[in-house]
Amino acid sequence: MSDYFDRLVRKAGLPPIRLHDLRHGAATIALAAGTEMKVVQDMLGHSSISLTSDTYTSVLPELAREAAEAAARLVPHQRSKRTAGLTSGSQRPSPSTPNSGKDHKASKKQQVKRAS
């Protein structure tokens, strides 16, 4: 069968490809199409899912990129104006607090004194 396939490939003017390479191509395309790894394992007749995973997932770097992009889409893109720029646990001084500007200036002076 492999010899017959080789003749067909040459006759069609295709680059050299082995019959077994079609199996890899089919598995790779199935994974790229979103087929579950367990289904591909069964399709190929592998005894373990790790063999299928180890062999075929490294072939598809675009799957890793797509997974990262899907995760990024879950992160909110817009923050509310009230909390923009604040980290967890930080608080913005209330503008209505008396002497808040003076306290900030005094704190800055203390920081400069400590640094020198």
Image (tube, helix red, strand yellow):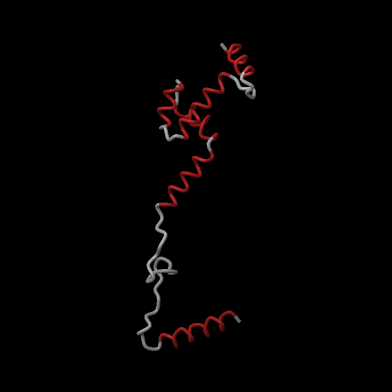
Residue at the farthest left position:
96
Q: Is 66 placed above or below 14 here? A: below
Q: Nearer the viewer, residue 2 or 114?
A: 2
Q: Nearer the viewer, residue 88 or 46?
A: 46
Left of 40 or right of it: where is 116?
Answer: right
| Residue drawn at (47%, 29%) of the image | 50
Q: Nearer the viewer, residue 103 or 96?
A: 96
| Residue drawn at (35%, 85%) of the image | 96
Q: Position of residue 45 (x, y in %)?
A: 45, 20
Q: Is 23 placed above or below 64 here? A: above
User: Looking at the figure, which quarter contains the N terminus?
Assistant: top right
Number of numbered discs on residues: 0
User: Looking at the figure, which quarter contains the C terminus?
Assistant: bottom right
| Residue drawn at (64%, 22%) of the image | 13
Q: Nearer the viewer, residue 106 or 14?
A: 14
| Residue drawn at (43%, 31%) of the image | 37
Q: Position of residue 11 (x, y in %)?
A: 63, 17
Q: Is 80 placed above or below 9 here? A: below
Residue at the farthest front position:
12
**Residue 76 placement: quadrant:** bottom left
Q: Position of residue 9 (x, y in %)?
A: 61, 19
